[in-house]
Amino acid sequence: MKKRIATLVLVGLLVLSANAFAFKGHDDFAIGAALTSSNLSGVGGMMTLHIPRVPLFLGIGANFAPEPQIAMTVDYWLHHAQLAGMLHWYLGLGVYGAVSPSNSSNSAFGVRLPVALQIWPLNSELLEVFLEIAPAWLPVTGNGFYAGNFQAQLALGFRIWP
C-alpha cells in the first residue's frame, strides 16, 4: 500500500511539472524542488511552483517518515529583500495541510510563517537556492482540534526562474 501511494505521488508530481512548463517564458514563473523535514524527525520532498501574476508560492509533496503523508503549502511573501551581494531573505505567511492515506489521525492543517535565506549563485535571477524554516501552528488534526500542536518545518531546495 505504501509503495502504491508513493508511486501515485511521484506520478502526480511529474504531471504537475509537465503542465507547469506551459508557463515557461513568463517573467515571474518558477519551479523547483526541496528536501523537507518536520521537527527534524522525518524526511520528505516537495515540488515548489510560482505561477505568473499569482502572488502565491505553492508546494506539493510527500513526507515519507515517520508515516507517509501527502502535504501541501500555499505561501504569500510578505517581505523579500537583499542582505548583501547574492544573499537575500524572505518572510511569508501561509497555510499547510498534510493528509495520511493510511492513518487519518495523522493528518494536520494550519498556518505557517516561512523565513528563508536565498542565494542566487549565478549572479542572475535564474537559479535560487534556499534554506527555509517555517514555524507552524497546526491545530486541526485527524483527531479534532488540538491548540498545542506546533511544528518546525525545514526545507532546503532550489527554484529555477526561466
Image (tube, rainbow, N blue to C red):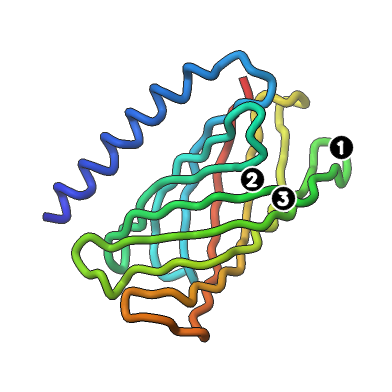
Residue 42, image x, y percentages: 39, 65
Task: State which quarter of the image contains the N terminus.
Answer: bottom left
Residue at x-position 61% and y-position 13%: 25
Which residue is disc 2 drawn over?
Answer: 130
Residue at x-position 28% and y-position 75%: 105
Circle 3: residue type: Leu
Which residue is disc 3 drawn over?
Answer: 117
Measured along the vertical axis of the image, is residue 35 above or below residue 133? above
Residue at x-position 48% and y-position 17%: 22
Circle 2: residue type: Phe
Is there a contact, CB below 8 Å, between mark 3 and mark 2?
yes
| Residue 85, numbered circle | 1
Cα separation between marks 1 and 2: 15 Å
Measured along the vertical axis of the image, is residue 145 above or below residue 13? below
Residue ranking furthest to the top: 25
Find numbered disc 1 in the image and state the secondary structure of the residue it sits on. Answer: loop
Residue 2, image x, y percentages: 16, 55
Residue ranking furthest to the left: 1
Towards the viewer: 108 or 80? 108
Is there a contact, CB below 8 Å, between mark 1 and mark 2?
no
Q: Is residue 38 left or right of residue 68?
A: right
Q: Earlier in the sequence, mark 1 or mark 3?
A: 1
